[in-house]
Amino acid sequence: MLKKLSLISAAVALALSASSALASVSAQDAAKLGTSLTPFGAEKAGNAAGTIPAWTGGITQAPAGYKSGQHHPDPFPEDKPLFTITKANLDQYKANLTPGQIALFNAYPNSFQMPVYQTRRSGSAPQWVYDNTVKNATTAKLLDGGNGFSDAYGGIPFPIPQNGVEALWNHITRYRGSYIVRRASEVAVQRNGDYSLVTSQQEARFKYYNPQGTYADLNNILFYYLSFTKSPARLAGGATLVHETLDQVKEPRQAWGYNAGQRRVRRAPNLAYDTPIAAADGLRTADDTDMFNGAPDRYDWKLVGKKEIYIPYNNYKVSSPEVKYKDLLQPGHLNPAFTRNELHRVWVVEGTLKSGARHIYSKRTLFLDEDSWQAAVVDQYDGRGELWRVSVAYLKNYYDLPTTWSALDVFHDLQARRYHVQNLDNEEPTTIDFTQATPDDGYFKPSALRRRGTR
């Protein structure tokens, strides 16, 4: 009898432990948001050394005369580098770099550099997103072992994360507007610096951030994404449509492709996990996109803690119309002269491939900016446990929303010595536009894909 009671007690304790792990934070902890913590859960205070300042609200308005759709003028044009990290002085700064960044110095010792500027905590978001984030803190719950969540909407779901998968969901669901339209290019840069542009128009409707919606309205859809290729001519007219589901184990991502030559719409059931992306020349997987996206179920996620890391921040030069692609895209990496790095606190989240699960990466480590939850750097390891690929997001504040997002995403293959760049728009007359009227769900039906792929 005692043995039976002991087993029952153990089972109850285990159940309570499990439910606690999936529960939201207490009202007392949530009260820190907006006081000692920012509304997104970052430490409001600066660091002890004074090299990271306090957060005071970030950029709250666009420069005078700016209109959405224009290239973003640098709000800090007078800032100059404090110092530059090179292979020669690398040891002095290693404690504040990721293994992937260090590997880039070792791979390109004569050319890779990181100019470091004054740290400006420019991250910001609309007040309604902050308000929703505070509400989410006490209501959001993980579902199905972390494959989804419930009772959170229109803000960061877990601003005070209790584990790695909560922090990961914060990145996946971070604020990027409600509806966006952009025209941009991507390139795979070869060892010798050669590249060919693939240009597309992209539209995304973030259903999770519909100001008039609720969690109940989602119907397991986070966002709709549509991309149609403009050039080169051999690819022009092709299109891709994605319905991004919240719980992708319960309901996998829905994707369709339109082939202009065949004039046919086909399902794309494999556009997930480690499926290689054609336009990336094999340098990017489906779930590399946006630094990480999609279902988290193939990895065990661990919240390692916080570190102070030099990460790309306030990168307005890399997307400036004054910078031509031929000057920006160099063999091995972007031209460092156009990049900006700052010391920021980041959350470190480590994903280890589950036993029996399949993926080309055995481990991936994400370094998430504490002020925005945007992944700034991701280190990815191969099946032997060796560092293989390094993804870098060159962050800036899109002050017309406002939000912190990447100006460019760069995916380095340390073994092939090639890299892929997304979201190049320097040589486009307009860039991302957040002001167009938001279409309804019907706009993103597969039946409309052929018409959109031909325009």
Image (cartoon, grey):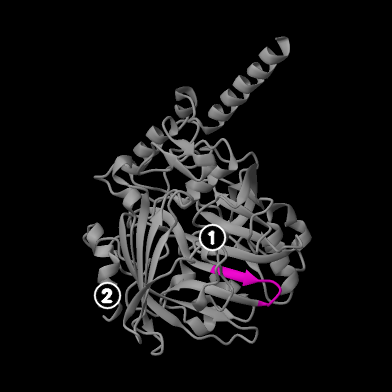
The residue lying furthest to the top in this view is: 1
Image label count: 2
* Residue 191 location (% of width, % of height): 65, 83
Q: Is residue 122 visible?
A: no
Which of the pair 445/99 is nearer the observer? 445
Q: Which disc is residue 291 wearing?
A: 1
* Residue 71 location (% of width, % of height): 36, 70
Q: Which disc is residue 11 wearing?
A: none
Element on which disc 1 rests: loop
Q: Say if the magenta span includes residue 416.
A: yes
Residue drawn at x 61%, y 75% is 333
* Residue 319 location (% of width, % of height): 45, 71
Which of the pair 52/297 is nearer the observer? 297
The residue lying furthest to the front in this view is: 1
Q: Say if the magenta span includes residue 44.
A: no
Q: Is residue 195 visible?
A: yes
On screen, residue 315 versus residue 391, left or right, reads: left
Residue drawn at x 24%, y 76% is 451
Q: Amino acid at mark 2?
A: Arg
Image quarter (top left, top right, bottom left or bottom right) of the N terminus: top right
Q: Nearer the viewer, mark 1 or mark 2?
A: 2
* Residue 30 location (% of width, % of height): 46, 29
Q: Amino acid at mark 1?
A: Met
- Residue hosting label 2: 452
Task: Please tell me whether residue 383 is drawn above or below residue 304 in the rendered image.
Answer: below
Which of the pair 209/101 is nearer the observer? 209
Residue drawn at x 69%, y 68% is 104
On screen, residue 247 versus residue 366, left or right, reads: left
Disc 1 and disc 2 in contact, CB within 8 angstroms: no
Of label 1 and label 2, which has the lower sequence position?
Answer: 1
